[in-house]
Image (cartoon, rainbow, N blue to C red):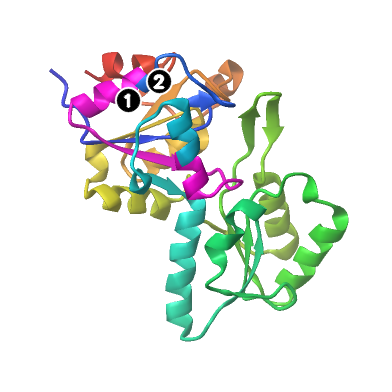
């Protein structure tokens, strides 16, 4: 009988739900995993909602979780900035270019849009324009470093696929010849923080997600097995041409326990 993982990492949007509707069977599947004594961590690159809002959203949909079981890219960014501030030995100046809902996560730092040490870049919806891009270019050209909460290529919405902030992160890297610090999936340090939160080794964990690059590929880079679900942003042609080979592929989260047991 296969050894069940000690820890399962769960992507949110597209894996557990789409919009405000749980994937059929998702709530029951998570309950079955808990019954087997498997620890769960809910991880996300979503940067339009605070951790509290995300936990509340999941609970309203019927998912059971403790607040400390959810780890977002914004939480990871705060931890990273604290480390950088300690290394610098002085207060850091940042430009938090993020959704209003998570700006409060960064109030412990000095905000400065003109001469920041770091730009913290997250999802800002339709606020992008050429003027903003040029401001970012000049601030980075004058010394600011870029912290990106993630570098997603695209994401699933109720209206279909949409380009994600990876478009702008990659563009800024190109025009400034700088490399952004990526703090969400597929960053290795992000996955390590999740493992550390449960005191579990990579080989004893399994990542479940609908993004073959960030979810499955990112997890595999650190030694975590990856399971791809055919919901959310999954597209067969993209899967067929990908170099990433998931350890498991299932129709949805509802089939997970059958696949790994």
**Labelled pair 1, 2 in contact (Cβ < 8 Å):** yes
153 vs 195, left or right, is right
Say which element carries label 1: helix
Write the start and end of the magenta stretch as one range.
28-55
Q: Is residue 249 visible?
A: no
Residue at 83% from the left image edge and 63% from the top image edge: 134
- Where residue 106 appears, as percent x and y from the top left, is 55, 65
Q: Which element carries disc 2, helix, strand or loop?
A: helix
Q: In the figure, 155 relative to 257: above or below?
A: below
Pointer 2 residue: 26
Residue at the spot 46% in from the left edge and 50% down from the top edge: 187
Tell me the quarter of the picture where residue 7 sits. top left
Compute the Cα span from label 1 to label 2: 6 Å
Within-10-Å neighbours for mark 1: few <14, some 14–19, many 20+: many
Tell me where residue 168 appears, x and y as whole percent.
71, 50
From what the image shows, is residue 84 above or below residue 217? Answer: below
Asked whether residue 168 appears in the rendered view, the answer is yes
- Residue 86 left/right relative to 122: left
Residue 46 appears left or right of 133? left
- The quarter of the picture where residue 167 lies is top right
The answer to which of 150 and 124 lies nearer the viewer is 124
Specify whether 220 is left or right of 75: left
Residue 10 belongs to magenta span: no
124 up-or-down from 28: above or below: below
- Residue shown at the point (53%, 82%) measured from the top left: 91
Outermost residue on the bottom side: it is 89
In this rendered view, identify the residue nearer to me: 31 or 235. Answer: 31
Relative to 159, residue 100 above or below: below
Question: Is 33 colored magenta in this rendering?
Answer: yes
Residue 203 badge: none
Q: Which mark is residue 30?
A: 1
Q: Residue 175, position in %: x, y?
A: 75, 60
């Amino acid at each position: 009988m296969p050894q069940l993982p000690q820890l399962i990492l769960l992507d949110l949007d597209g894996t557990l739900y789409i919009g405000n509707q749980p994937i059929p069977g998702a709530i029951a599947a998570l309950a079955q995993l808990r019954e087997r004594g498997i620890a769960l961590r809910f991880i996300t690159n979503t940067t339009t909602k605070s951790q509290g809002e995300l936990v509340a959203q999941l609970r309203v949909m019927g998912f059971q979780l403790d607040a400390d079981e959810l780890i977002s890219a914004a939480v990871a960014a705060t931890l990273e900035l604290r480390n950088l501030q300690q290394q610098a030995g002085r207060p850091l100046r940042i430009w938090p270019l993020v959704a209003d809902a998570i700006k409060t996560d960064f109030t412990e730092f000095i905000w400065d849009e003109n001469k920041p040490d770091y730009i913290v870049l997250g999802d800002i919806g339709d606020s992008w324009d050429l003027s903003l891009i040029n401001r970012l270019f000049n601030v980075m050209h004058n010394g600011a470093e870029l912290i990106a909460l993630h570098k997603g290529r695209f994401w699933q919405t109720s209206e279909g696929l949409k380009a994600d902030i990876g478009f702008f992160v990659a563009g800024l890297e190109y025009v400034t010849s700088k490399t952004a610090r990526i703090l969400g999936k597929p960053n290795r340090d992000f996955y390590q923080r999740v493992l550390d939160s449960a005191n579990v080794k990579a080989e004893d964990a399994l990542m479940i997600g609908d993004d073959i690059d960030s979810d499955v590929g990112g997890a595999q880079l650190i030694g975590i097995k990856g399971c791809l679900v055919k919901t959310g942003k999954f597209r067969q042609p993209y899967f067929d041409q990908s170099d990433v080979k998931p350890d498991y592929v299932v129709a949805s989260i509802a089939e997970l326990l059958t696949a790994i047991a």
